[in-house]
Image (tube, coloured by chain):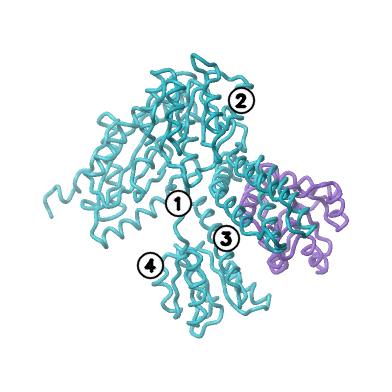
Chain colours: A purple, B cyan
Amino acid sequence: MVDKLVRILYVEDEPDIQMVARLALEALGGYTVAICSSGDEALQLAPGFQPQLFLLDVMMPGMNGPSTLKILRALPQFARTPVIFMTAKVQPGEVAGYKELGVIDVIPKPFNPMKLASRVQEIWERYHD
Amino acid sequence: MTNPSMLQAKLERLCDVYAAQLPEKLKHIEQMWAQLPQDNWDAEGFQTLHRMVHSLTGSGKTFGFALLSDVARNLEEHLRQIVQTETVLSEDQRQHIQKLMSELRQVAIYREALFNNQADSIAIAPPNYDALSPRRIFLLEDDLEQAEELKVQLGYFGYEVTVFHTLTDFRVAMQQTVDVVILTDISFPDNSLGGVEVVKEIQAGRETPLPVIFISANDEFLIRLEAARAGGIAYLNKPLNISKLIDKLDALTSTLTTLPYRVMIIDDSVDISTYYSEVLEQAGMVSMVVHNPLNVIKTLLEFAPDLILIDLYMPKCSGMDLAKVIRQLDAFVSIPIVFLSAEIDLDKQLVAMSLGGDDFLAKPILPQHLISSVNSRIRRSLILRSLVLRDSLTGLFNHTAIKDELDREVIRSKRHGTSLAFAMIDIDHFKQINDTYGHPIGDRVIKSLARLLKQRLRASDLVGRYGGEEFAVILVNADRATALQVLDTIRKDFSQLRYLSDRKEFTVTFSCGIADISQFRDVTELIEASDKALYNAKHTGRNQVVLSDAPAVEAAGST
């Protein structure tokens, strides 16, 4: 039996995308979503929020997606929490590279707000198969 | 769970906001590009430019601007290659970037509906670039009768329409015109694609294309394609659905009003708070500094900030306690509160957040950081607030919000001794409209009345959707006689609007009741009185505006 996905922490620096993602994931997907504007913020918030899944934007000023992932992995409680990258760069080589870093999948940006929640759910279920 | 049409409306609103901000974003990118030195390598500047373009790539399509994402991706890839070589740009490279930049501008008007139920439009445009004058329309239509009718109908919505019957007249007029929205038929007696061709000619000489809406009796794909190529932002079929047309025109001409953001700074240190205040004011915000936390509440109510910055450690009262107190005030439950502190202890920060803070900024903070984090938090909270306060179909205040506004306005007018009228409006036989023509048509009627009210009333008047087909209007600085005059004109115009359903035309009327605070000092009485007047309007024949009777006590002569 797969754990029901409830809490998602999304790290994204663009306020526009933050809002549309929140709407898509909360209203459409029924998830509880915490959104952080930077990797630093995510590291502060994550221990209290206990996300089951991280969505990380790859390209952010300051700490980018891969470095955020690295630090999360160093924390025992998030060493195994699944992570999905969100990125506008989806050349096949790059995706493979990201997967080597240990993310379970990559969602290309720009995403379709009507489909984001079902895409996340799909990845979650496949990961737990 | 949220119902789908509400979600759709919310998403569309977010897209509208994105669209409204797009011209500004493009301007920033262009400015950044223009600032880069020509004769030496500016790594940091180039990276910033790259990041700005990247953000368009990653967001455009999500908000309906798919072409924008494509062009931005192209430009981004080009910039990325240049960033890697780290050398001064060659003339060729400069020109290529320049070209992609102008393409970016051009494709930014192509907005697709996120939802496929708008089969009869190719694209919707974002709100105008600031230069466009709002409500002027050139209508090119060879059918005299149709043209006249359209002019009258658009006139009701405040659009000023100039009609041209021939391509030649139109060409001549366009030579002297800079800013106008073009509405044109496609087929003309001397040229079956005349409308498309003349638009192509006009657009060819322009850097920023004029917004053009095509109307046509012909729905062939190839013609639609030609229209899109000519820069058409929408393609509407005849017989024309006026509400759809107004939707498009409103989208083109509406701009979000942006008042300066208001920030309240609570910090016992005079130096620091003055510094923050100056930083924020330089960024165009209005700020108010409070040194003594005990004075906060009074100032809060008067200043009505969009965000509060609080120093975590103050002598008389800690920032955390203060946040708790502020959160207990109804009006400030959702205001963003940001703590400022040198606190790096994560646990303490989390405690503070749980007590009502939204964010932490560690001192010392760079001016740029302060501005951008304050800016983005306010923007987000205002949009979220509008999602809560606004009715999703009409964008008007919802029931709760308009009542809150009435409370506030009544207090204000009593304090200043000014007049205030309150009107209740109800669409006549609305159930019958829904039953006969279906709910989507009913929604369209509601939307058109909402729009008419918004366009015709003053910016200071407040309009809300009170219930299903019921509206409430607060007219500030107006007594009931003035309100009667204004709303009766709107009533007459509304009854002239034609709606179309299954190629059948029909018209709709409304009834209205008005009361003002010279008769009723109390909010509840004011609402009841106007509701009663509305009832009277309904029961004495509908399609009329009726004033409330004097209060019973007064009528009995006891005062």
Front: mark 2 or 4: 2
Q: Does residue A113 appear anywhere in the picture?
A: no
Mark 2, other Cα within 10 Å: few <14 / some 14–19 / many ≥20: some
Q: Which residue is mark 2?
A: B226
| Residue A112 shown left or right of residue B16 in the figure | right
The percent coordinates of residue B386 (x first, y second) are 49, 52
Mark 3, other Cα within 10 Å: few <14 / some 14–19 / many ≥20: some
Mark 4 falls within which chain? B
Q: CA distance from mark 1 to mark 3?
A: 17 Å
Taking depth in this image into account, of A120 and B400 the one nearest to the observer is A120
The reply to whether the C-beta atoms of the residues labelled 4 and 1 are less than 8 Å apart is no
Q: Disc 3 on helix, strand or loop?
A: helix
**Direction bottom: furthest residue:** B315
Q: Which residue is mark 1?
A: B257
**What amino acid is found at the position of numbered circle 1 in the picture?**
Thr
Q: CA distance from mark 2 to mark 4?
A: 56 Å
- Whether labels 2 and 4 belong to a single chain: the reply is yes
The reply to whether the C-beta atoms of the residues labelled 1 and 3 are less than 8 Å apart is no
Front: mark 4 or 3: 3
| Residue B408 shown left or right of residue B121 in the figure | left
- Whether labels 1 and 3 belong to a single chain: the reply is yes
- The numbered mark at residue B376 is 3
**Residue A121 higher or lower than B504, as above or below:** below
**What amino acid is found at the position of numbered circle 4 in the picture?**
Glu
Which badge, 4 or 3, comes first in the chain's sequence? 4
Q: Which residue is mark 4?
A: B302
The reply to whether the C-beta atoms of the residues labelled 3 and 2 are less than 8 Å apart is no
Identify the residue at image location x=66%, y=40%.
B66
Which badge, 2 or 4, comes first in the chain's sequence? 2
Mark 3 falls within which chain? B
**What amino acid is found at the position of numbered circle 3 in the picture?**
Ser
**Direction left: furthest residue:** B557
